[in-house]
Amino acid sequence: MVGVVEGVVSGAVAVAVAGIVDGSGVLDTVESPEPQAASAAATASPAAANLNRSHDMSARYRQQPRRTGNNAHRHYTHRAMTTPEPPANTFAELQIHPAVLEAVADVGYESPSAIQAATIPALMAGSDVVGLAQTGTGKTAAFAIPILSRIDTASNQTQALVLAPTRELALQVAEAFSRYAAHLPKITVLPIYGGQSYTVQLAGLRRGAQVVVGTPGRVIDHLERGTLDLSHLDYLVLDEADEMLQMGFAEDVERILADTPEYKQVALFSATMPPAIRKITSKYLHDPVEVAVKSKTATAENITQRYIQVAGPRKMDALTRVLEVEPFEAMIVFVRTKQATEEVAEKLRARGFSAAAINGDIAQAQRERTIAALKEGGSRGIDILVATDVAARGLDVERISHVLNFDIPHDPESYVHRIGRTGRAGRSGTALLFVSPRERHLLKSIERVTRQKVVETQLPSVEDVNAQRVAKFRDSITDAIGGPGFDMFRRLIEDYERDNDVPMGDIAAALALLSRDGVEFLMTEPPPERRRADRPERERPARKVRDDLATYRISVGKRHKVGPGSIVGAIANEGGLHRSDFGHITIKNDFSLVELPAKLPAGTLKALGSTRISGVLIELRPDRGGHSYRNTGGKPRRREQ
């Protein structure tokens, strides 16, 4: 039986209802912001609730048999218009721990978002929760605040585990937990993820961490090693569960869930609810409350979406014009390939923009420095990040005002996740999309899935760019007047004017010319594109098998109960690869063959050297047994499963 809460959002306010199932199987509804009728832990003061919180949900679960399957689920819908009590307008009304409330105030939060107002009372009451909300709605605080309010600070056992699909999201969730726990004594939050040294993680686990945030592959690795003990786990969170399953972690997630104690509180958050998520919900969650923050569109309404029609060869020129004319604080430019991130970032730096690239080949330490520079901005940081989809997943930088899709994504879900990097925490954002005439069908697909029209806008003209350049030049003169060394240079110029009888205007123009170092100041119109009729006829080359891939052998196969999804998920996450880096996969009984880039970077090979699937080291190495897919004229064999 599932309690369903539909949050109908008006501004930042949503109705929160916690569904509590008693021993007789009758569903009671308790309305926020007065959840004290829901449980004994909530009726006491927050401080008392903190002392009595440990394992109170376990006793309630033991009184109720765990039911799975379709017959155990019955939807109960509570509509906002029938609510006699007003929703929670402040965090103080949610009965959270005073120390956590103080930390929330320090962060600057004043009122809970819709997902927070609906979820926190249910989690404080001890219920399992399924939260349906778009990215950027504040769902991290929705589960972190109640967990920290109820965690046992006297014990250093691991009591809460949060699973995240990417290392970037894992780091950000861990940082959020640390912020909200700033005033709680003896709370340790430890992120564990692929790409980081085991030494740091093992030391942290030995010391004890009440909250562990990790990616599925690395969590399983520590479980197999016996370095992560989940026997005292009280809280389990699956964050961005749909993304986790889409990346091929379904088997890993089920493996972890099966190894956790039966009596625990589970929260699952997802932007969508595909059948695979429903299956996990029915199997591992006990009578969950379903919190649905509904929206008219699949993308946040505070994000303005526009597209510019531009041919592929003109994209760099178009990007330069947009950056010069469009006012922005920080921007992510999305491209399809790792190579394109470096190429676009290098061209932007050559044009005078502060830009950096981030992709799966970049070492974790450099990745963290790049993200820190993006957060810093200005003269000491960067303002433009060029990224691939995988590298930017889970990225949460508040100052990102714009997302520009340099390459249009092939699937609408990637578009939704991309533009979700802006418009965070209630701020407005702008999403721009470059579309070539041949890609209009992809634009239509995005509009159909997101149920939102993307408005066409014109590319800034040469006149617009030059007007901006002139205005910035004039502003730079104004800013320089009276600056350090101004009086000395004025005397030098006056002496030059007197000694050489040259007008002051000519001297100023010469100095401006010197400052340009031979670079043209004003933009000129590019030459017109050659029409198709003017182009010489040429034969289209036959489609070829990809020559950039080679066959690798890994030491897991059918008897280890692995599938293509778990192989792709583990290798992509641990090695920082994208789905496009994979070719054909053949699963044999004791081993598997995987097509990957022929020239894997040393950092990727090192990371994959310690990667495990289903607890077994994959031992990635080039295949020397002649199992080449190109031996049959380029036609791959049927995948064995």
Image (cartoon, grey):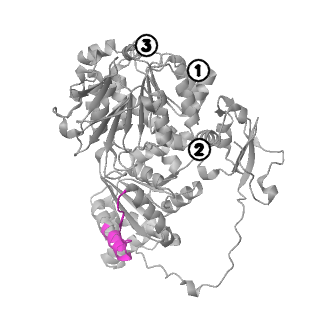
Q: What span is in magenta? A: 451-471
Residue 455 covered by magenta stretch: yes
> In the image, residue 603 lies at what x, y percent?
65, 42
**Mark nearer the N terminus (2 vs 1):** 1
Measure the alpha-carbon separation of dots 2 and 1: 24 Å
Label 2 Cα crowd, 10 Å radius (few <14 / some 14-19 / many 20+): many
Residue under label 2: 576
Q: How many marks do you count on the picture? A: 3
Amino acid at dot 3: Ser
Per the rendering, the mark at residue 263 is: none
Residue at left offset 42%, top offset 33%: 268
> Hey, which quadrant is residue 194 in on the image?
top right
Label 2: which secondary element:
loop
Sequence-first disc among 3 and 1: 3
The crowd level at tag 3 (other Cα within 10 Å; few <14, some 14-19, many 20+) is: some
Which residue position is annotated with label 3?
155
Write the residue at 21% across / 29% down: 33
Dot 1 alpha-carbon crowd within 10 angstroms: few under 14, some 14 to 19, many 20 or more: some
Task: Identify the residue under disc 1.
Answer: 227
